[in-house]
Amino acid sequence: MSKFKVGAGIADLDYPIEKYPAMSFSHLCEDKYDACNCRALAIETDDRKVLLLAFELSDIPEVPELEKKISEATGVPEDDVIITVTHNHTSPCDRGARMGGTDESRAKFREEYFEVELTSAINASKAAVASLQPAKYGYGEINSYIAANEITRDPQIGLYCDENGNGYVDNTLAIVEFTDLEGKPICFLMNHPCHATCAMGLDANGKYATSGNFTGITSRFLEEYYGGGAIALWTAGASGNLHPLIEAKVNMHYTDGYSSSISLPPGVGHMIMEGVGRQHAIDAIKCINRITDFTDEITLRHAKGTLPIENQLNVAAPTGGRPPIRPDYGMGLKSNQPEPAKPFVAPEIVDDPDHVGTLQMEVLSLGDVAFVGLGCELFCQIGRDIKNALPAKHTVVITHTPGYVGATPHQVGYIVDKSSAPGSHNPKLYRNLKPGFYDEMIVDKALEIYGNL
């Protein structure tokens, strides 16, 4: 155990408004609803210095050698630069929009946004390192009821979606509060398992808009509430099957099992997003008020590991109709669909040993709190099992760290939809990962890495 220092920083992550449209995770955006940011937390002891960066993005930036460049700019060892994203589905995305744009425009945007991401990362990191000061920390948690399990199907009634909360949900909002020695807040490191998907539809101006989503609203609310330069850094927990309880859509269910997501009118989703983000922030403030046990000494350790991820192969396309669920947004009412919504016959799925992915994992031990990072969309049940297994007093699971391999499913809620074409073996698509196959392996690997600290 040793005394330690903490610093935090924040930097703009927006694509220049004069260059819009911007490419987001799903759409070509002509408007900007609110800001996206990169936040950084620096922690230093006598023998180690660690940087944790959270980008309000959908995916880990593909900037070449990003960790190395951050290391060179800050002096923090490259291996101790930890990157994560909030998995914000309304941020600019350096991979280009799924809908809209040309190959040429995507390539141009990609290069330009690389510069934005790199500049933001370095500026936030430099600010965090430059502000390092003696600190103490405390841990707290509270239930924040903002998420629902949307990837479950009741086998008895044959209908999809437990967006009313009956499916398993981990509601835990975990917060590590860092303050100076007089108790002034420096940084709130938050973690909650929920997709940042509150608003993906049109804004009040009838345009698709970039946004920090509800997590950005939560962070800014806390930063304004506490003031004094305090940073509120939000991270995504094991939320592969958890989405906001209320989103910019309505799930329309039918007696034959058909289900479709219907977008709400323009602007309504953003009002919902504001409400969810602000309620989440109020839950965070309640949690912070309960944190009374602080210490000014820690042991800081960080270790990494990898786990081979086996894939599956669909030997044929589904037959006999189409799946009884349309997971994509705004596909319309059943009455508008030309095909009957009858059940389909799923193809045989076999092991695909020729295509093995690699799941990157890491553990950061901060005093009595262990942070387990995974490069995937981990289903919440596996996150729960990791928390229960590690011997640390408190365990926090952070997903969307580098090395993304896709959603890692628990044994519930695994579906094969029509887009699973014959011969598909893309390791980044969760339908090609074996459901329920990795649970114990992932928990065991987390324990192994923790033991190597």
Image: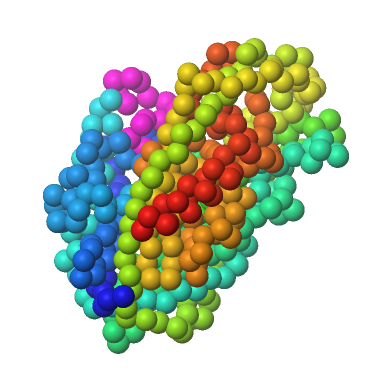
Q: Is residue 341 left or right of residue 447?
A: right
* Residue 95 falls within the magenta-colored stretch: yes
Q: Is residue 63 left or right of residue 293?
A: left
At 84% across and 30% down in the image, what residue appears? 256
Q: Nearer the viewer, residue 169 or 388?
A: 388
Q: Is residue 133 left or right of residue 277?
A: left
* Residue 32 falls within the magenta-colored stretch: no
Q: Nearer the viewer, residue 353 or 161?
A: 353
Q: Is residue 126 above or below residue 184?
A: above
Q: Is residue 97 above or below residue 382?
A: above
Q: Is residue 203 above or below residue 280?
A: above
Q: Nearer the viewer, residue 246 or 54?
A: 54
Q: Main secondary structure of the magenta part?
A: loop
Q: Nearer the viewer, residue 284 or 374?
A: 374
From the top left corner, tell me how far across and down residue 252 is, in percent: 73, 39
From the top left corner, tell me how far across and down residue 272 is, in percent: 57, 55
From the top left corner, tell me how far across and down residue 407 is, in percent: 53, 38
At 48% across and 60% down in the image, what residue appears? 396
Residue 33 visible to an observer of this rendering: no
The N terminus sits in image quarter = bottom left
The C terminus sits in image quarter = bottom left
In this picture, which residue range is highlighted in magenta? Answer: 91-106
In the rendered image, which quarter is residue 210 located in?
A: top left
Residue 409 visible to an observer of this rendering: yes
Q: List the single residue furthest toward the bottom.
A: 182
At 25% across and 37% down in the image, what residue appears? 63
- How many numbered marks, from 0 up? 0
From the top left corner, tell me how far across and down residue 280 is, in percent: 53, 64
At 34% across and 84% down in the image, what residue appears? 183
